[in-house]
Image (cartoon, rainbow, N blue to C red):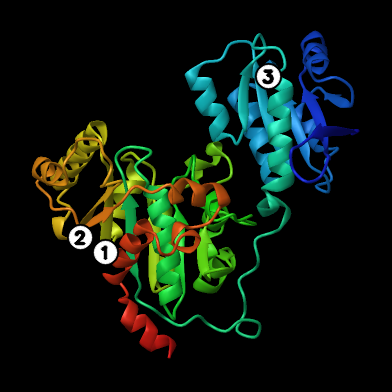
């Protein structure tokens, strides 16, 4: 197959990938190739494409409408497992919800209608090509084999605490709190501290800490049958300024279906066996994964912003947790931007929720500045009111004076 140059905003000017179009109907295949320009290789079937794959170069395979049946998608999924550097895009005559779900479950990165916007397919190929070049280093780099006693010492056994950070509405500051609290605990603890990004579709932890992960939680799930603490530890990426270990979210939303509640809780439970603290950042809605994490957690930080929609959603979330028999003593209410001049009084919020706020985080311009720099706010602006509030929250888990004595 011939190379296909993809322009990228990354440091390198172009990314060399091979682009293939798989479609048995020749006029349709030629139409799809016309949308992509020169340098595209045609194939009639997925099997024909698979026979040409070497696994040495990235390949974006554009599957035509004839490949949209479940049997062909199953073949495509099997080929992708064998060749992790191949990614697929499906082009169909008419897009339906059921077809989209079937395709995503088969590992297809994107699904587009053939009659869609001009240039949409080329843009989709570019996005997938960049993700193959940058992200699946997890695909390029094989998951390490389980270390043997000769080449790895067993990790010390720890009965760590699991702290889940949850919000019932996006934009409340949940990920900001997760990353900064985790970094603060990592700097105070003399044992490993891990941050897990459980927002499986749109996790931001890696971006907010300026990390380039080689592995994600999808890799951990794929080897769960032979998982042990040393293997799991080898899949984590380290935030070098603080020593925090991070388990990133999947690199593509389509991979979210590969991580269920059982797998997530199993990974978190193993992490707590060698980490003093496991902080879990979650999506801003209830699902099986979130409910499983809440049940497995020692503490749950419920984050709310100071506006009526946020408070309304938090009230509903608290009612849901009570219906699920979640012990209220494990909950900590965090009010973010608590000093905002929005004519909403903290006492009024507490009366509405029937819960006293445990932590009040002020509003400060340093937060978006820190996020845009890829730094946790406790490192970017350690003397700010936001950082002091997060440090006081960390005191509830590792008091600063205890941490100082440990370091001495």
Q: Position of residue 206 (x, y in %)?
A: 55, 52
| Residue marked by disc 3 | 120
Looking at marks 1 and 2 on the same chain, the residue that comes earlier in the sequence is marked by: 1
Do the residues under discs 1 and 2 have CB atoms within 8 angstroms? yes
Q: Position of residue 396 (x, y in %)?
A: 26, 69
Circle on res. 298: 1
Q: Secondary structure at mark 1?
A: loop
Rate crowding at label 2 as few (under 14), some (14 to 19) or many (20 or more) other CA atoms within 10 Å. Answer: some
Do the residues under discs 2 and 3 have CB atoms within 8 angstroms? no
Circle on res. 330: 2
Viewer-proximal residue among 310 and 191: 310
Q: Is residue 111 above or below residue 397?
A: above
Seen at 29% across and 60% down, the residue is 297
The Cα atoms of the two marked residues, 2 and 3, are separated by 48 Å
Write down the quadrant of residue 211 in the picture.
Answer: bottom right
Seen at 57% across and 28% down, the residue is 103
Residue 291 visible (yes or no): yes
The Cα atoms of the two marked residues, 1 and 3, are separated by 46 Å
Question: Which quadrant holds the N terminus?
Answer: top right
């Amino acid at each position: 197959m011939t190379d296909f140059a993809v322009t990228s905003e990354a440091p390198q000017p172009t990314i060399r990938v091979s682009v293939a179009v798989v479609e048995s109907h020749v006029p349709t295949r030629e139409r799809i190739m016309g949308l992509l320009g020169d340098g595209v290789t045609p194939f009639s079937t997925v099997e024909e494409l698979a026979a040409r794959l070497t696994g040495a170069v990235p390949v974006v395979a554009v599957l035509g409408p004839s490949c949209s049946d479940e049997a062909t998608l199953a073949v495509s999924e099997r080929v992708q497992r064998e060749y992790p550097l191949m990614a697929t895009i499906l082009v169909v005559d008419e897009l339906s919800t059921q077809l989209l779900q079937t395709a995503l479950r088969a590992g297809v990165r994107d699904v587009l209608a053939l009659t869609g916007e001009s240039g949409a397919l080329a843009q989709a190929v570019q996005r997938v090509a960049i993700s193959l070049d940058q992200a699946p280093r997890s695909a390029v780099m094989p998951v390490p084999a389980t270390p043997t006693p000769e080449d790895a010492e067993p990790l010390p056994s720890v009965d760590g605490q699991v702290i889940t950070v949850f919000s019932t509405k996006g934009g409340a500051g949940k990920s900001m709190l997760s990353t900064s609290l985790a970094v603060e605990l990592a700097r105070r603890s003399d044992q490993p501290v891990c941050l897990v990004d459980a927002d499986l579709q749109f996790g931001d932890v890696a971006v907010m800490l300026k990390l380039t992960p080689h592995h994600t939680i999808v890799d951990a799930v794929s080897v769960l049958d032979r998982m042990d603490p040393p293997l799991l530890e080898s899949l984590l990426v380290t935030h070098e300024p603080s020593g925090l270990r991070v388990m990133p979210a999947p690199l593509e939303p389509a991979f979210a279906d590969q991580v269920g509640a059982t797998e997530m809780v199993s990974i978190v439970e193993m992490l707590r066996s060698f980490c003093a603290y496991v902080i879990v950042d979650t999506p801003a809605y209830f699902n099986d994964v979130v409910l499983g994490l809440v049940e497995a957690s020692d503490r749950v930080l419920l984050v709310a912003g100071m506006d009526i929609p946020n408070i309304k959603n938090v009230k509903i979330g608290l009612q849901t947790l009570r219906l699920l028999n979640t012990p209220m003593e494990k909950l900590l209410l965090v009010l973010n931007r608590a000093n905002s001049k929005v004519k909403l009084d903290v006492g009024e919020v507490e009366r509405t929720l029937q819960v006293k706020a445990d932590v009040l985080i002020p509003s400060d311009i340093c937060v978006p500045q820190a996020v845009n720099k890829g730094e946790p706010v406790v490192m970017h602006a350690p003397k700010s009111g936001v950082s002091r509030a997060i440090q006081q929250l960390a005191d509830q888990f590792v008091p600063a004076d205890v941490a100082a004595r440990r370091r001495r």
